[in-house]
Amino acid sequence: MIMNKTKVLSSVYDFASVLLTALIAVSIIFTFFFKISVVVGESMENTLHNGDGLLITAINGEIKNGDVVVISQPNSYELVLIKRVIGTEGQTISFDKKEKCVLVDGVPIEEDYIKNDMIFFHSMSQSYTVPKGKLFVMGDNRNNSADSREPGIGFIDERYVVGKVFYKLGDTKLFNS
């Protein structure tokens, strides 16, 4: 009887130690290397949809134009934002109403990911020069996106970028940003 009790206790101890080790490993991975985020809203359609689960990486290296990032910067909407980087520090962003496109440093950018042609608003007649340490971001659903074009969002401080999207859960391939 004592032998069986020892075996049971040993098995319980082994199971608990394996479980604890696994929990610690997962915690370390998701604290320092990856995070999970969920898309809320339609601002990134057709690339991302409401409810999509995302794996994001911590920023290792520079953020570049075209990256899709998760942003925790306080804003007037009190939301975590998921947006595409359109401009980085020193770049000038403007809009060509006739051609219905975004210009970075005077050059139209190719945007095969946007949902629809942009509807132009009065505020889009100005150009934006991105300050040092900041980003200019926009949603892919340009007509339904709270982004850097709005005073309530504005430029994004790079320190508030939680990470870059690298995988959409449920996809069979890595995320192309």
Image (cartoon, rainbow, N blue to C red):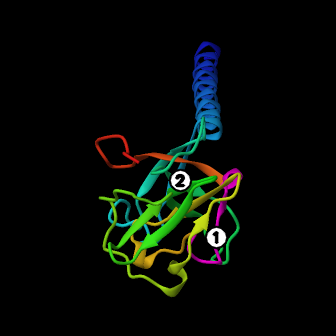
**Residue marked by disc 1:** 154
Could you say where residue 120 lies in the image, as x and y percent from the top left? 42, 82
Up-down relation of residue 128 to residue 58 (above or below): below
The residues colored magenta run 148-160
Judged left or right of residue 54, residue 29 is: right
Could you say where residue 59 lies in the image, as x and y percent from the top left? 60, 41
Q: Residue at x 36, y 67 (%)?
A: 45
Q: Amino acid at mark 2?
A: Val
Q: Nearer the viewer, residue 32 or 154?
A: 154
Judged left or right of residue 95, residue 154 is: right
Q: Nearer the viewer, residue 131 or 80?
A: 131
Q: Secondary structure at mark 2?
A: strand
**Residue marked by disc 2:** 69
Between disc 2 and disc 1, the foreground one is: 1
Which dot marks residue 162? Answer: none
Q: Residue at x 58, y 25 (%)?
A: 18
In the rendered picture of this protein, how many numbered marks are placed on residues? 2
- Quadrant placement of the N terminus: top right
Q: Give the residue at the far front of this rendering.
A: 106
Magenta stretch encompasses residue 106:
no
